Image (spheres, helix red, strand yellow):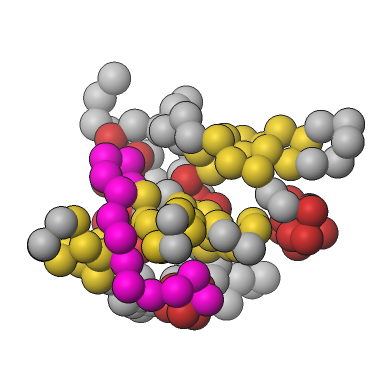
């Protein structure tokens, strides 16, 4: 596999803003680099999230966050490699996070929709979520309609 990238530009009147689609056999480091490059040059700028790892404070990029959830009366953000404690409540965090990327799936969890590998919709109507890194989560009943609307 080479690092060559085919680029095609199509004029389409239905888009006011550029729309980037990446097609590949699988998600690789090259694909992640392309996504990061496009995000870095876009006009959207979302705040990095101050997160605590022991005594250190790290600024975590929103694109690195897989999910944010409540655990033991604390809010945790999880990335591919680490979990961090944040001082914000989930409600406050939800206001800071990119609404096109993040969606609330329960009272205690917000997920990065871009990190979702797939959904498991069972006969009972519940929706399971599998992330790229293998983590699984479930949509609460209260948020089922919202997720179903997003999936349409």
How many numbered badges does the structure rendering display?
A: 0
Along the line of sight, the residue nearer the viewer: 43 or 84: 84
Where residue 38 sits: x, y (%)?
33, 59
User: Which residue is drawn at the image coordinates 21% and 62% (left, top)?
Assistant: 52
Would residue 130 appear left or right of 87 to someone viewing this image? right
Residue 25 pos. (x, y %):
47, 26
Instruction: Identify the residue at the far front of this view.
Output: 72
**Was residue 80 drawn as part of the magenta stretch in this picture?**
yes
Q: Is residue 22 visible?
A: yes
Quadrant of the rendering where the N terminus is positioned: top left
Report x, y in % for residue 37.
Answer: 27, 56
User: Up-down: is 137 above or below 59?
Assistant: above
Residue at horizontal 47 percent and vertical 46 percent from the top = 115
Query: In the figure, residue 109 lies in which quadrant?
Result: bottom right
Q: Nearer the viewer, residue 98 or 50?
A: 50
Q: Residue at x 11, y 62 (%)?
A: 55
Foreground: 61 or 13? 61
Confirm whether the magenta stretch covers residue 102: no
Residue at the image position 24 percent from the left and 31 percent from the top: 3
Magenta part of the chain: 79-91
Q: Is residue 9 visible?
A: no
Where does the image place residue 6, in percent across and percent down from the top left? 37, 39
């Amino acid at each position: 596999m080479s690092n060559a990238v085919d680029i095609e530009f199509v004029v389409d009147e239905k888009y006011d803003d550029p729309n980037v689609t990446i097609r590949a056999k699988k998600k690789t480091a090259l694909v992640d680099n392309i996504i990061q490059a496009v995000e870095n040059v876009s006009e959207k700028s979302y705040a990095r999230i101050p997160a605590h790892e022991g005594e250190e404070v790290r600024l975590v990029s929103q694109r690195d966050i897989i999910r944010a959830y409540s655990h033991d009366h604390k809010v945790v953000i999880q990335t591919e490699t680490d979990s961090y404690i944040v001082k914000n409540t989930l409600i406050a965090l939800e206001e800071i996070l990119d609404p096109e990327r993040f969606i609330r799936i329960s009272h205690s969890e917000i997920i990065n929709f871009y990190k979702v590998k797939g959904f498991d919709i069972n006969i009972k109507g519940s929706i399971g979520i599998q992330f790229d890194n293998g983590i699984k989560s479930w949509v609460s009943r209260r948020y089922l309609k919202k997720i179903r609307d997003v999936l349409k």
